[in-house]
Image: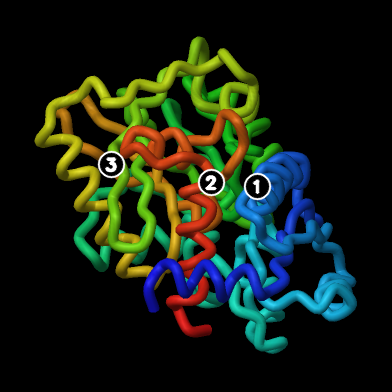
Amino acid sequence: MNSGNKMAQLKAKKIGVLMGGMSSEREVSLKTGSAILASLKRLGMNAVGIDAGRDVCARLGEEKVDVAFIALHGRYGEDGCVQGALEMMGIPYTASGVAASAIAMNKRITKIVCQSAGVRTPAWKELKKGSSLENVTAPVVIKPSSGGSSIGVSVCLSDEQIEPAVRLAFEEDREALAEDFIEGPLITVGILGDMIFPPIEIEPSKGFYDYSNKYTPGSTTYHIPARLPQATLDEACQMTMKIHSALGCRGATRSELIVGKDALPWFLEINTIPGMTQTSLLPKAAAALGMTFDDLVLTMLMEALDDGR
């Protein structure tokens, strides 16, 4: 189907932008969804925003939605739950399917996939409530196994910081990771279909790339192109596509990697529903290729039709 036919087909359908939701990332999701909804309306689409609570299936039916644009982050929206509901209702949707979403949401399982695929990732220990912290020593990164936006993540440079960091992580999930700390620049690589976007180097003004640095305009500098050796960036892109494919992801994803002192990239995590706010990285990477925000949104939507779900 050519792009003109796809456009005509989309304009004949009602598109529901699923946003908000019930996770700790609700506020970010509302911003993502609002930006996408505005874009769809600029494109002349019949689009409506739906706050995805427990009545989301009823809302989709009431609104007679034909295609869903998922703008949810975190639990129930990025972990395969809403994808399963849409599958049951026979509604095509953007982003990855049920299995890929569920696996990618879990950082521990994603790391196991990394090992299987031969992708370099920092060593880690699995933590559960009541786990001994005797063998967890600084420097270390403590993070919830599931979730995003760096909520509940702590970089511990001293042993005294570890126990409170673990408690914080358990506020977000019943499972946490103690991941080896690697010092170096953070980069992100976006993928859309079979297209790899230019890597972006992320430079927070202070600390690490936490929630505040992610969503406060001006608190982080983004370098496009990244100020790293081309061989390092090429390997990062190859690693990202390998994990995207190994997990069975579709549509758009955005991965984060850290580059050690030896110029080797280490894979950290993958997001199957990248943010689309004014500070989000996927739109920045797309812009480096000459794609407008509306171009990006439309391409993501067309991918949903191509998947044939």
Q: Which of the numbered marks, if any, corresponds to residue 266?
A: 3
Q: Which residue occupies 87% across, 69% down?
A: 54
Let me know if residue 1 appears in the view: yes
Q: Earlier in the sequence, mark 2 or mark 1?
A: 1
Q: Which of the numbered marks, if any, corresponds to residue 294?
A: 2
Q: Which residue occupies 41% across, 22% down?
A: 222
Q: Is residue 168 left or right of residue 231?
A: right
Q: Secondary structure at mark 3?
A: strand
3D distance between C-alphas at marks 2 and 3: 32 Å
Residue 24, how many percent across, how many down? 75, 46
Residue 72, how many percent across, how many down? 68, 56
Q: Residues within 10 Å of mark 1 (few under 14, many from 20)?
A: few
The label nearer to you, 3 versus 1, is 1
Q: Is residue 281 left or right of residue 82?
A: left
Question: What amino acid is labelled 2 in the image?
Answer: Asp
Question: What amino acid is labelled 1 in the image?
Answer: Arg
Q: Which residue occupies 67% across, 42% down?
A: 35
Q: Quadrant of residue 253?
A: bottom left
Residue furthest left as drawn: 231
The label nearer to you, 2 versus 3, is 2
Residue 23, how many percent across, how many down? 76, 52
Give the camera-side residue of 106 and 292. 292
Q: Quadrant of residue 83?
A: bottom right
Q: Secondary structure at mark 2?
A: helix
3D distance between C-alphas at marks 3 and 1: 39 Å
Question: What amino acid is labelled 3 in the image?
Answer: Trp
Q: Which of the numbered marks, if any, corresponds to residue 42?
A: 1
